[in-house]
Image (tube, rainbow, N blue to C red):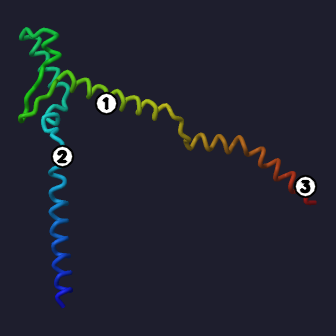
Amino acid sequence: MQLIQKQKKMIKAFLFISMIFFIALPLFSQQDNTGRRQFYDLVELTKIIQRARDAGFSEEELKNLEIKESGVTINVNDYMNEILARRKIADEKLKAFLSKRFLTVGDVYHEMVNLEPDVLTKLREELVSER
């Protein structure tokens, strides 16, 4: 009897610990990308860079330009290069996909029309040879 109660307590404790683990794990595994999520729009970043140029920033200072958002520091130049590299990869994938040739209904139809005389002659030969 005591063994069954101990087993029930152990199962409850295991379930409790596993629930805490599954609830807390996503909280700890999240990376701190909150600052990066704020600036997905490249137009806004280019406006910020243009304002900095108008204010008299040199090219060296523009390369080192950083934005603080929610306590996270983002290097604008690195971030824009990263986004442009991602877009380039996505464009290359799209270009490769679009360059592939896929069968269309017209392709299948033309293939069937081209093969039809061969099929008819084979059938005719089979019928003649059977007699």
| Badge number at residue 107 | none
Residue type at numbered disc 1 = Arg
Q: Secondary structure at mark 3?
A: helix
| Badge number at residue 128 | 3
**Which residue matches tag 1?**
86
- First of labels 3, 1 by sequence position: 1
Residue type at numbered disc 3 = Val
- The percent position of residue 46, horizontal first and vertical second, equals 17, 20
**Which residue matches tag 2?**
30
Residue type at numbered disc 2 = Gln
- First of labels 1, 2 by sequence position: 2
Circle 1 packing at 10 Å, graded few (<14), some (14-19), many (20+), is few
Classify residue 4 as left or right of residue 95.
left
Classify residue 128 as left or right of residue 38.
right
- The percent position of residue 28, horizontal first and vertical second, equals 16, 50
- Location of residue 22 with respect to 86 vertically, above or below: below
Classify residue 45 as left or right of residue 126.
left
